[in-house]
């Protein structure tokens, strides 16, 4: 009979189980938790003895959770959240916070908002660190499974348990290499050009590409890349063009010319998205407030990096909207 009982399980063991499952590696889990591999192995052995299951088996070069481990992980996430709520003080003090905050974002949102966000929150919470993961075409499971605390995206995932708030709007521009071609001045020029675009995994086109296709605007895409950072190398030295958010002019596409799109385009909204379970959590509410605060300065800094086009700013800011569910 095991010398352990259920009272030997604590939040650290639950957190370790989730880390190993999510990382698929004891080494990576140890790095994420800031402990040694031997400490992770020792605690895993303890948890195995308590639950009577091996929990992980070898799979290729990594490890994979057993069915029992996957079932325990679902309960572990709920228990950790309950422990967090149980220990939360009535008033939240950022100076005492020690945590890793995970935000899902693509390279546009990452470069635009998150450096300013991190500097701002660390000025108040010096023991906070930020982990950024690629959102791609974000799903509700990113938040339901607590792979991250916040998602920044123009397309919030759907779900009655998923909440969202609009941060700002951007407009679209045509990007091109001015040394190789001029801006497409007419719809005919635009449609005759070779186009580059971004397709997020798994095969999720940009909103603007879907909208134009629905309107019957048929373009010839000769290159599709998984992120905005991959567009520039295809434009450079070629006559290809790309229809993308104007804010990319501040960073990744700074070296390229940008012109108005010769067809009507809707604006691109940007949302902050979170799970209902975190709606009233003091730390989560504070993080959302800080992200809202840095939006205006981050947009101003981006515009300062962009040459003025016709004397008109490219980013249209909007009043922050109320919190809404993402169910549609």
Image (cartoon, helix red, strand yellow):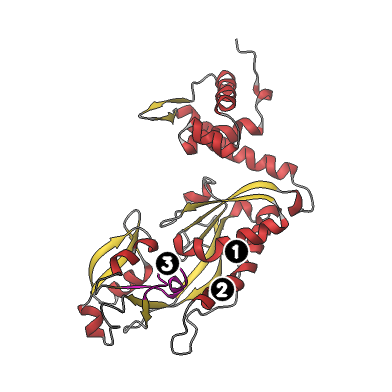
Pick the quarter of the image with the N terminus. Answer: top right
Vertical relation: 68 (above or below) 295: above
Q: Quote the CA–CA distance across marks 2 and 1.
A: 10 Å
Queried whether the magenta region covers residue 137, the answer comes back as: no
Whether pointer 2 and pointer 1 mark residues with C-beta atoms closer than 8 Å, the reply is yes
Q: Earlier in the sequence, mark 2 or mark 1?
A: 1
Camera sees residue 321:
no
SS at circle 1: helix
- Residue 116 is tagged as 1
Q: Is residue 325 left or right of residue 123?
A: left
* Residue for point 39% across, 63% down: 228
Q: Nearer the viewer, residue 308 or 12?
A: 308
Residue 295 locus on image (x, y percent): 59, 70
Q: Earlier in the sequence, mark 2 or mark 3?
A: 3
SS at circle 2: helix
Residue under label 3 = 252
Residue under label 2 = 301
Span of residues in magenta:
242-256
Q: Nearer the viewer, residue 102 or 166?
A: 102
Queried whether the magenta region covers residue 249, the answer comes back as: yes
- Residue 160 is tagged as none
Q: Quote the CA–CA distance across marks 2 and 3.
A: 14 Å
Residue 208 locus on image (x, y percent): 36, 72
Vertical relation: 53 (above or below) 257: above
Residue 219 locus on image (x, y percent): 23, 73
* Residue for point 28% across, 72% down: 213
* Residue for point 32% across, 69% down: 210
* Residue for point 65% across, 46% down: 99
Q: Nearer the viewer, residue 104 or 95?
A: 95
């Amino acid at each position: 009979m095991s010398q352990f009982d259920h009272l030997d399980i604590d939040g650290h063991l639950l957190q370790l189980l989730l880390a190993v499952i999510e990382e698929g590696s004891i080494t990576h889990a140890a790095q994420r938790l800031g402990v040694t591999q031997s400490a992770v192995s020792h605690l895993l052995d303890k948890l195995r003895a308590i639950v009577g299951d091996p929990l992980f088996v070898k799979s290729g070069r990594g490890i994979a959770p057993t069915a029992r481990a996957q079932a325990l992980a679902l309960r572990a996430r709920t228990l950790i959240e309950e422990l967090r709520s149980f220990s939360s003080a009535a008033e939240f003090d950022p100076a005492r916070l020690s945590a890793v905050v995970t935000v899902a974002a693509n390279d546009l949102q990452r470069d635009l908002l998150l450096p300013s966000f991190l500097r701002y929150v660390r000025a108040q919470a010096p023991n906070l660190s930020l982990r950024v993961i690629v959102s791609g075409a974000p799903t509700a499971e990113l938040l339901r499974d607590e792979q991250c605390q916040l998602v920044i995206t123009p397309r919030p995932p759907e779900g009655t348990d998923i909440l969202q708030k609009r941060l700002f709007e951007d407009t679209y521009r045509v990007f091109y290499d001015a040394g190789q071609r001029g801006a497409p001045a007419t719809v005919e020029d635009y449609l005759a050009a070779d186009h580059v675009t971004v397709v997020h995994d798994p095969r999720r086109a940009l909103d603007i590409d879907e909208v134009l296709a629905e309107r019957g605007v048929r373009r010839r895409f000769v290159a599709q890349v998984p992120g905005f950072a991959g567009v520039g190398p295809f434009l450079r030295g070629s006559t290809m063009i790309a229809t993308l958010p104007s804010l990319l002019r501040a960073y990744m596409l700074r070296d390229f010319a940008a012109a108005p799109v010769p067809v009507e385009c809707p604006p691109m909204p940007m949302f902050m998205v979170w799970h209902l379970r975190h709606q009233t959590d003091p730390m989560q509410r504070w993080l959302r407030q800080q992200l809202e605060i840095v939006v205006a300065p981050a947009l101003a800094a981006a515009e300062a990096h962009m040459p003025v086009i016709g004397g008109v700013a490219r980013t249209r800011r909007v009043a922050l909207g109320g919190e809404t569910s993402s169910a549609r």
